[in-house]
Image (cartoon, rainbow, N blue to C red):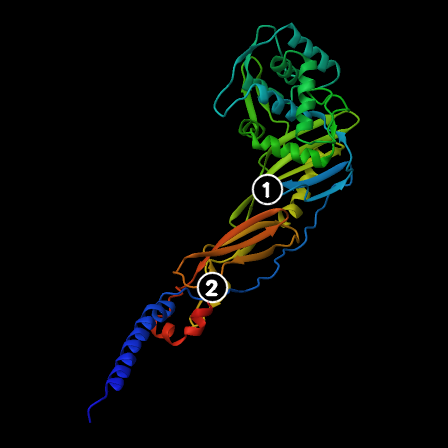
């Protein structure tokens, strides 16, 4: 039976609109599902516990004041005795050297300018000898380099040469003292008082905490660090001089400065290099007010047993450790892992805390950076990058076409 015109027209309309619908489906549905962004997988953080070592047990001397610190560790790690200012004696010479080097800098291997001794320098010898201070011979016309004057001041602890160096650098004693006081203030050594470049006066004083800071500043200068680690020096016209620090070479001790003052006792500001696991720590310590240097040295060696035992190498993370897990909507999984191993040296039972920052991802490749693990201990921070352990890939057209609702909801 032949179709009527109306029937033919209706069928054509169905075919046309069906074609249009198919075109619209291809134009909108397929791109919406095949090309649209995916939901990001939220990381599930894996918590890591607090790490600690055992508490330190130190045998501090029972006199004066004592304190222990270390390079890279804030402030004082342990202390005993007086916390107020005590006479520094010849430890004061470290301030003199650091202040002089501000205006007359030296580098390792260089001697600096030649300095001719004058009657003023001979007068320093006479003055400090009359005060029963440590001196070394001097004659008008003798010439020394700046480095030699520093060796005489720090190795032999010659008061007269420390004074000569200060006046040479600044032109007068008053000018030196003004510069020294400004230097002390700029480094926030609030307990420290400087009244002389040698420490011969009991008013040259500081707390043990500020002396730890002074020790760290001295070690940070390569020229000073090398001189204070020298057991002996030979100076023309004077001869061979032995370092007043008798502990050099014992228990890793490689500095820094002795001090002796009648009525105040024997002092030692010292440094020691110590191996902790496969890491090295530089210890800075001070003992003030001992009866003699023999007593002080013995007490320091006894104390160092506990000091060494107080440092611990704490293993923070091993490369590949998991810090977060990802699960995609299509069931694929991966993890955020540490990209490197890390350890840290801690003191006593100081706690190490950790936290992680991990980014949500939709897809990613193996090793792609996704965050950071942060470890904190006593003001120090170690950051370890986190990367994907395996790739998180696109689910493909089959999953996309069969989950249009999830695709449409993606941001």
Q: Is residue 280 visible?
A: yes
- Quadrant the N terminus occupies: bottom left
Tell me how far mark 2 sits from mark 1, CA to CA: 46 Å
The residue pinned by badge 1 equals: 72
Q: Is residue 236 left or right of residue 173?
A: left
Q: Nearer the viewer, residue 150 or 33?
A: 33
Across and down, in percent, residue 79 comes to 72, 42
> Along the polypeptide, which appears first: circle 2 or circle 1?
1
Report which residue position mark 2 lands on: 411
- Residue 219 lies, with reference to residue 111, above or below; the image says below
Task: State whether residue 188 is above or below residue 58.
Answer: above
Verify CB contact (< 8 Å) between mark 2 and mark 1.
no
Secondary structure of the residue carrying numbered label 2: loop
Residue 364 screen position, x and y as percent: 40, 61
What percent of the width, then of the height, locates residue 401?
36, 74
User: Relative to the observer, which residue lies in front, 79 or 258?
Assistant: 79
């Amino acid at each position: 039976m032949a179709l009527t015109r109306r029937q033919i027209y209706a069928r054509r309309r169905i075919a046309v609109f069906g074609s249009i619908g198919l075109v619209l489906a291809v134009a909108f549905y397929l791109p919406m599902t095949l090309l649209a962004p995916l939901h990001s997988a939220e990381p599930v953080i894996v918590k890591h516990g607090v790490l600690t070592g055992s508490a330190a047990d130190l045998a501090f001397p029972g006199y004066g004041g004592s304190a222990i610190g270390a390079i890279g560790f804030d402030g004082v790690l342990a202390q005993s005795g007086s916390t107020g200012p005590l006479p520094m004696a010849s430890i004061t010479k470290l301030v003199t050297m650091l202040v002089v080097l501000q205006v007359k800098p030296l580098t390792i291997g260089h001697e600096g300018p030649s300095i001719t001794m004058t009657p003023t320098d001979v007068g320093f010898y006479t003055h400090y000898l009359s005060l029963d201070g440590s001196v070394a011979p001097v004659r008008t016309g003798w010439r020394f380099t700046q480095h030699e004057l520093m060796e005489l001041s720090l190795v032999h602890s010659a008061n007269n040469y420390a004074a000569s160096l200060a006046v040479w650098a600044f032109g007068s004693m008053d000018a030196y003292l003004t510069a020294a006081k400004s230097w002390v203030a700029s480094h926030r050594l609030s307990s420290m008082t400087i009244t002389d470049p040698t420490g011969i006066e009991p008013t040259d004083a500081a707390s043990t905490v500020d002396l730890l800071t002074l020790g760290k500043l001295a070690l940070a200068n390569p020229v000073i660090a090398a001189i204070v680690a020298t057991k002996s020096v030979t100076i023309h016209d004077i001869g061979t001089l032995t370092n007043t620090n008798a502990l050099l070479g014992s228990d890793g001790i490689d500095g820094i400065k002795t001090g002796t003052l009648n009525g105040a006792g024997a002092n030692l500001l010292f440094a020691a290099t110590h191996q902790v696991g496969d890491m090295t720590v530089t210890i800075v310590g001070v003992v003030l007010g001992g009866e003699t240097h023999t007593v002080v040295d013995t007490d320091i060696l006894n104390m160092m047993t506990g000091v060494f035992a107080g440092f611990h190498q704490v293993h923070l993370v091993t490369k590949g450790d998991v810090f977060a897990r990802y699960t995609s909507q299509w069931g694929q999984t991966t993890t955020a892992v540490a990209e490197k191993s890390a350890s840290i040296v801690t003191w006593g039972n100081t706690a190490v805390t950790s936290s992680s920052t991990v980014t949500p991802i939709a897809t990613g490749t193996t090793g792609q950076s996704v965050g950071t693990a942060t470890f904190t201990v006593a003001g120090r921070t170690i950051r370890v990058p986190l990367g994907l352990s395996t790739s998180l890939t696109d689910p493909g057209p089959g999953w996309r076409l069969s989950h249009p609702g999830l695709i449409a909801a993606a941001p």
